[in-house]
Amino acid sequence: MAVEADKKRKWKETQLPYDSEQFSYRNYTKAIIRRGHGLVVEYCEQVARQNGGRLTVLDSGCGWTDFYGKLEHIIGSYVGIEPSLEELQRAESRENQFLIRGVGEKMLVRDSCIDIVLHIADLDHCFDAQKVVEESFRVLKPGGASIILLENRGRWANDVRRMMRMEISHGDEHLYYFDVDDVLSLVKPFGEVNYARSYGFLAGFDWLSNALPKSFVSGLEGMSNKLFAPMFPTKGQHFIIGVVRRGGGPSFPLGFLCPNCGNEFEWKTGECLKCNNEIHWIHKTILDAIDKEAK
């Protein structure tokens, strides 16, 4: 129980006030982040082509919704879930965007209504990663896809650190530190993995990268991926896994669930017609679904 209480305290202290603007990165890490985001966009574009239309996207840990801008050309509807009010308040208001101050363990959309779920560096911040994955596949339409991007505990730089008996850390803001096999074990009960890639192989280069032109750093990062990824497919600094939901059944239009009772309700309504509880809104646009205990 003490371990669980400590984990809850850490989640509350690190995730509710999370502010992405407090973090800065060296040029090499920025190049790796750009690489990963580009791969996510390519994957989502492929899903859109297969669907023959625009996607209903759920972005778990959406931050200030920067991925809306990257995917705007294929988005029909966008649901962003984020526990940090600081992040959500930076988001631009959009007609087809629905923002929820909440958690991935309780996604508050109806079953089988989402085409693609994004987990962009969020799964290692969650309180219960397994529950978040379960929720992802509950809300996905049959044949819908979840894509997970994470920093890699199994990267070869960490192998070197282990051999040298050096500390391996992942930052206080993370509750987990995953490798590729960890995530595969989480998703395989629910779907078929159709995409897996790791990238970022220049161990130790991060410290030198700010002294070099950004274009040179990006070019070198790309060359290292072409050289090392085929030989070491799970040893890059970051990795991406795409999973298609297994099974058949109907799919449904986007719909939202009451934070109190789980009954469907109309977006921006003030009261649930089933449980009669008040539904709270932030600035009249953001559904506030964070439990009172968590606040």
Image (cartoon, rainbow, N blue to C red):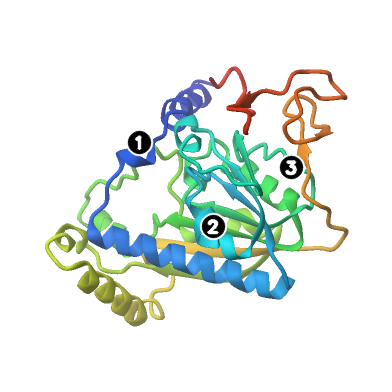
Residue under the point 71% across and 38% down: 108
Element on which disc 1 rests: loop
- Spatial CA span between label 2 and label 1: 21 Å
Residue 60 at x, y percent in the picture:
57, 46
Q: Residues within 10 Å of mark 3 (few under 14, many from 20)?
A: many
Amino acid carrying label 2: it is Ile
Residue 92 at x, y percent in the picture:
51, 44
Figure quadrant of residue 57: bottom right
226 in relation to 104, above or below = below
Residue 33 at x, y percent in the picture:
37, 60
Q: Can you tell which mark lies on residue 56?
A: none
Count every numbered label the image shows and give the total.
3
Residue 282 seen in the figure: yes
**From the viewer's perspective, is 256 left or right of 149?**
right
Question: Label 1: which residue?
Answer: 172
Amino acid carrying label 3: it is Val
Question: Label 2: which residue?
Answer: 148
